[in-house]
Image (cartoon, rainbow, N blue to C red):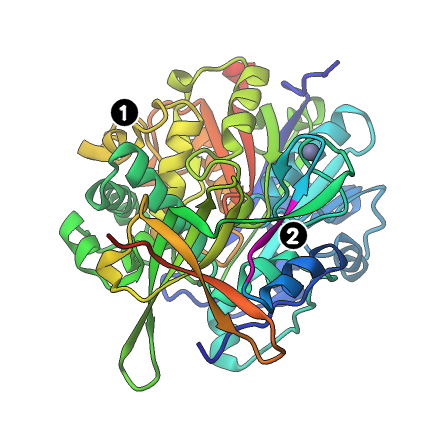
Amino acid sequence: MSRSLRGAAAIVGVADACSPTGELEHFGRDLETRMVLEALEDAGLGLADVDGICHAQSAMSFAEYLGVHPRFTDSTNTGGSSFEVHAEHAAAAIAAGVADVVVSVYAATPRSDRKQGRSFGRVPPPGPNPAAEWEWPYRLRMPIGPYALAASRHMYEYGTTSEQLAEIAVSTRRWAELNPRARFRDPITVEDVLASPMQCSPLHLLDCCLVTDGAGAFVMTSAERARSLRKQPSYVLGAATCHDHMMISQMPDLTTTPGAVSGPAAFEMAGVKPDDVSVLLGYDSFTITALLHLEDLGFCGKGEGGAFAEEGRTAPGGQLPMNTNGGGLSYTHPGMYGMFLIVEAVRQLRGECGARQVEGADIAVAHGSGMVLSCMSTLVLGSEATL
Amino acid sequence: MSDRAVPDPSPASAPFWEATRDRRLVLQWCTDCDQPVQYPRSFCPRCHGSCLDWREASGQGVVHAATVEHRPERMGETEHYAVVLVDLDEGARLMANLVGCEPGEVHVGAPVQVTWEPLEDGRQLPLFELRRG
Ligand SMILES: [Zn+2]
């Protein structure tokens, strides 16, 4: 028997940091702490209220640094979708009375790290590692290679074209033009995308997300407590996750992600249909990633994502506003982008988005994608009116 | 290729790598559900049976997905090489490089056959080439 999380919890505070230069002054725990404090301030809460910590590397060491002793802890790492998973877990914990105020945080500064020669040491996964045996010898470039393979299969099965993939980059850039904090704001055309250097066929440079510094945090609490706080709550209407592989050579179907499971499950819990969605924040590590979400979440049929992306349907003024902050393609992408989906979803629901605000946005979907199309997590958020 | 990662066998996959010394492509096989198990494991992830055996594969298959990597080299030259997923006739899917062809010949759906590249320890790494004609 499954219990619905609908309306039990709400996101009450958000923060994010990024810069048009792609670089941030702070890094590491310092930057994470700044994000947490800013998100708590946004909510009108303080560190003393926090009894749950989510962190995609180590909730324990971060809680130690903060001086918080949480009763709910979650160090789940599903790659870029980690923060949607954290939101789902946090909502479940809050609904069950296991936690009251949960914080999730993320910071990464790949641009500055490279410039400053900072390295934080990578721990190899425990062996035997199937990827080292069955994939690494073939020098598939990461993370782009698996997405290129998926795109090649989508083109073969459905006739999807490079022009159609490029449309996604073009529409997303049009949103970035409206966001003064976005990394890239100059308009681009389909021709620009196709003329940008090929990386892994069929994906060009402008089919790829940015590499920038970035950080963010969100605060979640019970719906009841949310109503007494500073900002208008963004209620969790639905949340669901699914993963089906870790290596691309093990993906059951290269053209269907586990979002085809998590999406409908989250929509069902929320009681919404794709047509009801005001804003889609769909993880865009690459153009093909976003295209697959359009299909798997049911905004169009399987194989129809290419045609759907045409004619600016996901651009400002289009039928489905998608990645209104400018996305991983043009806003920011420090490596695990899922946090920024949630932050933008909340800001849209609150009406805080200025020139890029979607009029009357009351249902926003943050759909995270982790690893190599491996783990999808769908979070449906709604304003008070949708309860 | 000079900078290949050398595959490190697991206990379950040792027979696969041993057979490559004779340029034989073998697949772990579940005799309960009569299907290949790739990658090799201590049980069948499909039917959860544990009656596992090894079978000789034909080495023939079809390209399921393909990408040509455009990797800028230090001296300004761009290096091209193809990475493919191959569906073997027996039903298993392998990642490999497609070799002996031009980037423009790399297509999803192309029929391919196995070829081998020696590793320093006497094992051979399976690669694929186009079946021509
Ligand atoms: Zn079996």
User: Where is residue B99 shown, x and y percent of the image?
Assistant: 36, 65
Q: Name the residue under label 2.
A: A37
| Relative depth, front residue between A178 and B4 | B4
Q: Name the residue under label 1.
A: A319
| Relative depth, front residue between A287 and A352 | A287
| Relative depth, front residue between A306 and B63 | B63
User: Where is residue A358 shown, x and y percent of the image?
Assistant: 34, 30
Q: Please tell me how many numbered marks the rendered image carries.
A: 2
C-alpha separation, residue under disc 1 versus residue under disc 2: 36 Å
Quarter of the N terminus of chain B within the rendering? bottom left
Asked whether the viewer can see residue A232, the reply is: no
Q: Is residue B27 magenta?
A: yes
Q: Where does the magenta region start and end?
A: B24-28
The label on residue A303 is none
User: Where is residue A225 shown, x and y percent of the image?
Assistant: 71, 26
**Residue pictured at 46% horizontal, 80% vertical:** B2
| Relative vertical location of residue B25 with respect to residue A292 in this rendering, above or below | below
Tag 1: residue type? Answer: Gln
Q: Which residue lies furthest to the left in this view?
A: A191
Q: Is mark 1 on a helix, strand or loop?
A: loop
| Relative vertical location of residue A108 with respect to residue B79 in this rendering, above or below | above
